[in-house]
Structure formats: C-alpha cells, structure tokens
Image (cartoon, grey):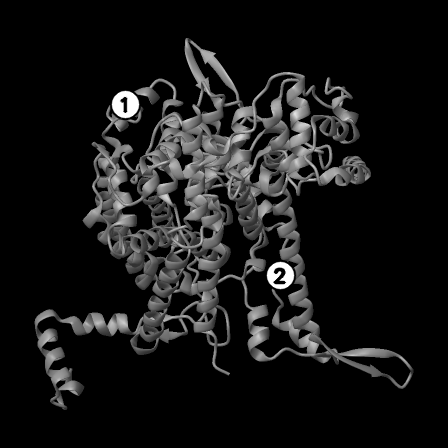
Amino acid sequence: MLLIGLVAAGGASAAVSTVANAEPAGTAPRAQQLTVEDGQELFRANCASCHGLNAEGTENGTSLIGVGAASVDFQVMTGRMPMAYSGPQAEQRDPMFTQEQSDAMGAWVASLAPGPEVPSEELLDVSQVDEEGVARGAELFRINCAMCHNVAGAGGALTEGKWAPHLRDIDPAHVYEAMLTGPQNMPVFNDANISPEQKREILAYLDYLDENPSVGGFDLGSLGPVSEGLFIWIFGLGGLVAVSVWLTSKPN
Amino acid sequence: MTSTATRDTFTSRASNYLDERTSMSTLVATLGRKVFPDHWSFMLGEVILYSFVAILLSGTFLTFFFEPSMTEVHYEGSYVPLKGIAMSAAYASSLDISFDIRGGLLMRQVHHWAALLFVAAIGLHMLRVFFTGAFRKPREINWVIGFVLFILAMAEGFTGYSLPDDLLSGNGLAIINGMVKGIPIVGTWISYLFFGGLFPGVDIVPRLFVLHIMLLPALVIALIGVHLVLMVINKHTQFAGPGKTNDNVVGAPIMPLFAAKAGSFFFIVFGVLVLIASTFTINPIWNYGPYDPSPVSAGTQPDWYIGFADGALRLAPGLESELWGMTLSWNILIPMAVLGIFIVLVMFYPFIEQWITGDKREHHIAERPRNNPTRTAIGSAGIVFYAVLWAAASSDLIATHFRLNVFQVTWWLQATLILGPVIAYFLTKRIAIGLQKKDREILLHGYESGRILRLPGGEYVEVHEPLDEYESWRLKSFDTYEPVMVRPNAKGRITPGTHLRAAMTRWFFEDRISPVTRGELEAAKHDGH
C-alpha cells in the first residue's frame, strides 16, 4: 500500500510540475488565436513524455493518432489528462489548460489522422428536443448507459477498482464526446449505433435530471436501497430508540 | 361493578350498558392490569406494532389507486421523461400515485419507509429477546412465532417491492427467477408455475398483489394476535432488581399509565415516519423506468432486509458442475443451503439451547448478556455472519465510495464471512467473562471512589466505596450453570447422544464465573474495605 501511495504521489507531483513548466509558454500568445503549431508545442511540452513526440504512443501511453479532437477536448477539459496520478483510471479534476490551448492541441492531434470532431452547438442544443424526445432519451439512457452509470446517473462500480463516474451537472459537450470516443473503460457509441439526434435526446434527459430536483425530497445520493436501509436504521430506528429511552427514563 | 353504580354519570351508565351485554369488564380488568416493565428495550416491540399500523393505513390508501395488472399502456401522466413510453398498467398507476394523485407520493413514501422500519424494528427486537435470554421457557413458542413473523415481513416486503413493476422490481424478480431455476429438476417447472409461463410473463404482478394485500397481511395480523396473547399469558420478562423476582413483574400497568405512554409513543412513531417520508425520497420508481428484461442499473439492490440473501449470492463461488446432463449451479445452491440452515438454526435456537443446557425451569428474569457468555458469543457470531452477508449486498457501493477494487472487496468479505464469526465468538466470550469478573470485583471490593488516602506509614491507597442496594442487586443476581455430567441412563448405558450433550454443555458452561455468594459478600465486608 505504501509503495502504491509513494508511486501515486510521485506521479502526481511529476504531472503537476510538467504542467507548471509549460504554463508560461501557453500564456504568452493568449492574445491571438492559437494555431495548430502552438498545439503541437503544447502537446510536446505536456503530453509527449507518455504519448510520444509525434503522438505515436510509448509504453506509458497509447498512440493518439486518429483519436480526434473530441477525445482531446474530453480528456483535457475534464482534467483527466494530464493524468493526476497512475491509478486504475484517470481521475477527474480541474482542467490544467484553457479551452483555447486544449483546442489547439486537439487541432494538432486531428491533423495527424481523421477522428471524431468536437460536437457543434447544434448537436448539443437540448432545447430542440421535445417531451417525447426526453422520454426517448431516458429510455436510451436506461438501455445503454444505466448498467454502469446507474439509472439516475449516480455512477457505479466497475472491475479492478475502476468506476463509472456520475453524470450530474456535466458539460453536455463532454458527455457527447465520451459517447463518441469511449474514454477509458467506456464503449464507443458511434453515430451508427446511437444517432446524433438520439445522443441529443440522451443529453436532454440528463439536462432534465439536472434541472428538476428530486420530487420526493432529499434523494440520499440516488444510490437506491442501500442508502435507504442505512438511513432507516440510523435515523429512523435510532431516533425511535432514543425516544423510547426518553419515555422510560425515571423522573429525577 | 358496584363502585360505578354509586355515581350515576353518563360514563358509568354507558359502561354498565356495555358490560351487561359483553362482560367486557373482566377483559378490561385483566388487560388493564397487564404490567409493562420500565426499560427502553421493551418498547421495540411497540415500534414494530405501530409501524405495522402505519403500513396498513397507507397501504389501504395505495390499493385505492393501484392497478395490479400487466396490461400494456402508454404513459400519459405528468412525468415528462416517461411520456408516451409503453409500460404495464401497474407501473403507470404507481406513477400516477406518485405524480397525479393528491397525497399519493407521501402515502407511497410513508408505506415504504414504514416497511423498512417495521423489519428493522423486528430485527432489533429479536436481538433484545435473544441476548437477554427472554426466549427461554415458557416463551420458546413465542420466539418461533416471532421468527415466522420476521420471515412473513420479509415476504411482504419482497412482494411489495415487486409490485410497481419498474426496472428495479423486475430485476429483483429476475434474480428470484434465476434462483428458482437453479434448483435441480423441479426449478424450471416451479418458475413456470410461479410466473404463469416464461419469465416475466403477464401474471406475476396480479399474483403478487393478492399475496401482498390479502394472504400475507392476514397471516401477519393473525400471528401478531397470537404473539400478543402469548405475551399477556406469559407476561413480560424483567431485569433483576430489589423486589423484581422470577415470580412477579414490576412496572407500570396498562391502565392508566402505560396506555398514555404507549399512546403517545404511537403518535411519535407515526410522526417520525411522516417526517421522514415527507423529507426523504424512497424508491424513486420514475427514475427506473418500466421493467424491461435487458437493462440493469448499476447499484441495483434489494431493500435492506433481503440484502443478506443478495450478499450470499454475491459471495458464493462461481462453481458449476454437470451431472447426468443436469447443470448444478453451486453459486445458487450453496447460498440457498447456507441461508436455509442459518434460518432454521435461529428459529429453533431456544430448543437447541434447552437441550444443551438441560434447563427446563421457567425463566422470567431477563439475563444480562454478559452473564451468559457463550450465548452472547453465539449471538455476536451470528450478527457478524449476517452483517457480512448484508454488507456484501452493497459490495459495489463499498468499492466506489471507498475507492477500492470491487474484486478485493468481495474476497475480503468472503474471508470475513468465515473468519469473522469465529473471531467475534471468542472475542465476545472473553469480553463477557471479563465484564463478569469486573462485576464480581466491584461487588466484593466496591467501586473506585477516586479518593486517595495517605496512610500514616506513607502508603497511598484508594478508597473503595460499596455499591448501593439497587446496583449490587443488579450485579449479583444471576443464575449459573454447570456442565451436565455423563451419566448412564435407566438401562445403564451411555448413549452417543449423552456424550454429545455432555460435550455441548461443557462447551457452553466450561468457562464461567460464579455469582457472588452471601458468604463471600459477608467475608468481603469484614475485610475492612
């Protein structure tokens, strides 16, 4: 355990220091639009140690040729890359780059080989989905996503210490990109599998969950019967035992 | 009733009227003098009773609007993410209760929370009875009835969980279907009978509904009746104290004091349930969507009281073998056998203990758990066994919330399931004996007063004060047992049964602390402490 902890801590500090070193290079040309070359430079400074100077991959990281700009945007802007530390899966955290920097890296990676693109505003516009569409999205979500992410998007366990993250208040672009690129353990849901309109309906359902608070009161984490059972034992029965102790206490 | 006849009031005339026609006064006089000992643990049974009343009332409300049918309908209610979706009438009416019927959601949540509380209170009540030895003669039968009630409560819970026909309840039924089908030879046929054809079919909801609202509640009510009548006949147990002996019960009579207390407690239980139901959601069926055999949500669990069975399935090794063209799924058969044995052992524990100890006397004094170390140790081993199975039902949530590997959690729980009860047994037994030793020490030499005296010779001693009457009574009045000796029976033979029993009583009573005797107490007093 100690060894794992040390390795993890070392990895984290290494990741943070590389990013810190790269920061001045990134901040200087912020005024103007970043170019593909800037993206390449950022990539080489921050990602190449694992993914290779030309994104061809090393033994520490996969090749990124053909993953597309969508994958870069998802991984970088959810803070999963650069990886916080080596573990069962990359953790989410505050992103280490600005959107422009990420886009520049994405443009460079996309220039290497064709891959999924960052979704347009049109594809993410849930206001175009009507009520039936939300219901269809909910059904698609239950069939395709709930196995790992739980019906209410609360997340769930995967094998070997990995997990499916919760889907509450996530940028719809990132959800869309995740479906498109299948990051980490997630399968790819390409446009032949789930069409862009259907993807938008799924986003509309997630948006509905975010916008509409639990109708029945506090949702106890939407974890299902386990949290309900703990709650009734601790607060329900515990409270009533306290009351019965009080009722049978002798007056002083 | 001569005393009431002297004053001619409306109450006296009304009660006379009733009494002349029903002879109620005998009943009221007997029941009214039924005595309840004043100890909080005796109130747990009431929590059960009152939450059951809450279940009955809220459940009746729900039956007004619930449609126990699996006819396909398209949802047209007010919950947007299910608009137009095909579902069973049962699920659609459950959604209507939740969204479109005034007070429906509150009643659903009261019903479900009360059900969880009902079974939880049963669990705690059984633990109280077990650890104080209140199941001993003459209450063995009442223990069995209570245990059957516990099983019935679980059956009620499970049938109710399956009624809304949402994804969660359908997943629960799918597991039951799998377990039934895992029984060799007859399993498939039983499943066909139960579901009226291939799972899930269109019959199961109406069938479970009849069980849930008719047969099972009738049995529960009848058995609660018998349970309470036996409680009145056998009277309550009580903890030992000055004036509290094996032949009496000291406490408040029902009329008037206890009735007032119990009545207020009834409203408190109701109030707590409604408070919980109005602030915390339970089983948000609208999230789960209609049942469809293909999807399963992450975090699909049964309600807490079925958790131990789910956990047993999760911990069972994934073994399978074929015999004469028949597949034996050990991952199902082993848990079913282990749980069956566990349930039978708990249900018949009073008779098992009685056979081992050979104690056929009547017991009306509740034992302090420490004074029967072996039973207490058995009980904690049982708790650990149950708790590990229970925890295993949430192995996935343990893994995600504590950032662990779900496989390692399972392996760890498998090891704990076997080693945990053994460790708990020895630990509890030693702790109980240690506590007994401490009691003995305090009785004989008093408690440490914290007052330090310096003697003329320079020595420091702490003054020990003797206990007051009440405290010392509590510590010194308990029975002790000795192992049964191996003796030949009437025919002059020693049967293997006798040997077994002797070995069992040795196991039960070999390590023991005898209660303080009068002689020891006298001697201690004269010691000058």
Q: Residue at x 33, y 32 (%)?
A: B291
Q: Quarter-wise, where is residue B360 in the image?
A: bottom left
Q: Residues within 10 Å of mark 1 (few under 14, many from 20)?
A: some
Q: Residue at x 25, y 56 (%)?
A: B102
Q: Which mark is residue B192?
A: 1
Q: Which one is earlier in the sequence, the residue at label 2 or at label 1?
A: 1
- For the residues labelled 2 and 1, the Cα–Cα distance comes to 59 Å
**Image: B435 above or below B174:** below
| Residue B509 percent location from the top left of the image | 59, 51
- What is the x, y in percent for residue B156? 32, 44
Q: Is residue B55 above or below residue A152?
A: below
Mark 2: give few (<14), some (14-19) or many (20+) Cα within 10 Å: some
Badges 2 and 1: C-beta atoms under 8 Å apart?
no
- Residue type, label 2: Ser
Return the residue nearer the eye: A113 or A157: A113
**x, y percentage for residue A1?**
76, 37
Tell me the quadrant of the picture where the C terminus of chain B can be found: bottom right
What type is the residue that disc 1 sits on?
Tyr
Name the chain under label 2.
B
Please report the residue visible at 41 percent of the width from the left and 65 percent of the height from the top: B43
> Total number of numbered labels?
2
Of badges 2 and 1, nearer the viewer stands 1
Whether residue B8 is visible, yes or no, is yes
Occupied quadrant, residue B229 = bottom left
Q: Quadrant of residue B251?
A: bottom left
From the viewer's perspective, is B238 left or right of B524? Answer: left
**Which quadrant, please, contains the N terminus of chain B?**
bottom left
Q: Compared to B261, does A121 lie above or below? A: above
Q: Is residue B352 visible?
A: no
